[in-house]
Image: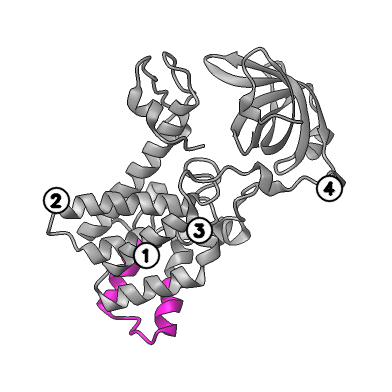
C-alpha cells in the first residue's frame, strides 16, 4: 500500500505512485543534461532532479505522466526534495486515474457555489446581473472545476472559483468601507475577470495552456464571452453598461507590461486590479510558507520578483490557517 507523497519524513526512503506535474530538461554548469521534475499527488508537491538524463528520458518522463517513484526524501536549503533512485512509467492497465493526483481547493465546491451566488444577488444593475448569471450557467462545470493558473497561484482543482470567492470577500470589505464604490460593478468584475481561463487552460489535471490561451489569452477571451452573452440577451452592445463591464475585465491586469490591453480608467477597475493582485500574491506567499519549516526562508517565489519570505518560528496564525496545497 503506497503512502502519499507528503506522508514521508526527511531521510525516509519512499516508493510512491505520483504524477509528474512539471518536467524540464536542463543543463548543469558542466553541460550535462538533467530533468528538473515536480512530483505531485493529492497530498501536495515535491521537486526532484533526475541526473544524467537523455532526450529520450525527457520524452518518457514528460508532464502529465504517472510514474512509480523510488527514492528518498531529503532537505535542501530548508526545502524538501526527492533524491531519485529510479522512475517507472505506470501503464493504464494498472488502474490509476489522473484525478487521484490532483490537489483541490481548501473549500467545498458546493459551498463556494452557494456563496458566489449570494454575491450575484447583490449585483443590482440588471445588465451586469443577467450577463454574470448567463456566463456562470454557461461555464458552470469548468468554472468550479478549473484552476486559476498553471503554476503561479490557485493552481488546484476549484482554484478559479476559490480565487474568485476570495476576491469577492475582499471586495465586500472594501465597499463596506468606501461607499463611493459601485458594489454591483465591482462584484461583476470579480466574478468575470478570470472566467476566460475556462478557455485558456486545459483543465485541472496536468494543466497546460490551450491554443486559444496561447494565441489570445483569458482577458480577450472573456471580453468576447461578454459580447456573445450581451448579444444573446438582446442588450445594446454599445451601451455604457456593456462597455463598463468589458473595461473591467480588459484592464484587470493593471499594466501594459502585465498583459493588460488597457489601463484601469474606472475606480472599480483600479480596485479590481489591486484586489486580484493582492489575492494572487497572498496565495503564492502563503502556499510557499506552508511548505517551509519555521525558522527558514521559502524558495524564491518567481511571481513575487524572485523574493524569499521568512517563516517565523512562532507563527500561530499561519499554522492554524487551512492548507492551500
Q: In this orientation, does residue 255 appear? A: no
Q: Are marks 2 and 3 in contact (CB under 8 Å)?
A: no
Label 4 to label 3: alpha-carbon separation = 27 Å
33, 66: nearer the viewer: 66
Label 1 to label 3: alpha-carbon separation = 12 Å
Q: Which residue is mark 4?
A: 92
Q: Residue furthest right?
A: 93
Label 1 to label 2: alpha-carbon separation = 22 Å
176, 285: nearer the viewer: 176
Q: Earlier in the sequence, mark 4 or mark 1?
A: 4
Looking at the image, residue 67 sits to the left or right of residue 301; the answer is: right
Q: Position of residue 116 (x, y in %)?
A: 37, 60
Q: Are marks 2 and 4 in contact (CB under 8 Å)?
A: no
Q: Earlier in the sequence, mark 2 or mark 3?
A: 3
**Range of magenta residues:** 225-250
Q: Earlier in the sequence, mark 1 or mark 2?
A: 1
Q: Which residue is mark 2?
A: 177
Amino acid at each position: 500500500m503506497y503512502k502519499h507523497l507528503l506522508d514521508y519524513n526527511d531521510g525516509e526512503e519512499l516508493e510512491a505512485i505520483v504524477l509528474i506535474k512539471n518536467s524540464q530538461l536542463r543543463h548543469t554548469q558542466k553541460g550535462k543534461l538533467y530533468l528538473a521534475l515536480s512530483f505531485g499527488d493529492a497530498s501536495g508537491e515535491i521537486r526532484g532532479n533526475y541526473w544524467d538524463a537523455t532526450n529520450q528520458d525527457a520524452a518518457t518522463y514528460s508532464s502529465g505522466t504517472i510514474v512509480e517513484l523510488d527514492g528518498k526524501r531529503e532537505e535542501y536549503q530548508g526545502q524538501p526534495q526527492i533524491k531519485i533512485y529510479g522512475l517507472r512509467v505506470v501503464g493504464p492497465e494498472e488502474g490509476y486515474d489522473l484525478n487521484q493526483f490532483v490537489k483541490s481547493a481548501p473549500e467545498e465546491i458546493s459551498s463556494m457555489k452557494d456563496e458566489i451566488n449570494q454575491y450575484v444577488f447583490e449585483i443590482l444593475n440588471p445588465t451586469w446581473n443577467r450577463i454574470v448569471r448567463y456566463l456562470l450557467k454557461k461555464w458552470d462545470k469548468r468554472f468550479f472545476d478549473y484552476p486559476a493558473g498553471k503554476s503561479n497561484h490557485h493552481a488546484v482543482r476549484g482554484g478559479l472559483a476559490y480565487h474568485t470567492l476570495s476576491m469577492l470577500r475582499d471586495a465586500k470589505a472594501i465597499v463596506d468601507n468606501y461607499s463611493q464604490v459601485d458594489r454591483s460593478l465591482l462584484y461583476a468584475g470579480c466574478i468575470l475577470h478570470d472566467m476566460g481561463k475556462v478557455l485558456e487552460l486545459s483543465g485541472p489535471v496536468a494543466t497546460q495552456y490551450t491554443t486559444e490561451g496561447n494565441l489570445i489569452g483569458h482577458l480577450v477571451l472573456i471580453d468576447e464571452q461578454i459580447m456573445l452573452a450581451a448579444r444573446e440577451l438582446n442588450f445594446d452592445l454599445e451601451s455604457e453598461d456593456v462597455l463598463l463591464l468589458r473595461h473591467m475585465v480588459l484592464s484587470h491586469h493593471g499594466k501594459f507590461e502585465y498583459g493588460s490591453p488597457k489601463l484601469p480608467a474606472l475606480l472599480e477597475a483600479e480596485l479590481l486590479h489591486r484586489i486580484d493582485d493582492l489575492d494572487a500574491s497572498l496565495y503564492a506567499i502563503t502556499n510557499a510558507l506552508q511548505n517551509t519549516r519555521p525558522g527558514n526562508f521559502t524558495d524564491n517565489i518567481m511571481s513575487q520578483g524572485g523574493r524569499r519570505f521568512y517563516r517565523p518560528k512562532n507563527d500561530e496564525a499561519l499554522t492554524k490557517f487551512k492548507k492551500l496545497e
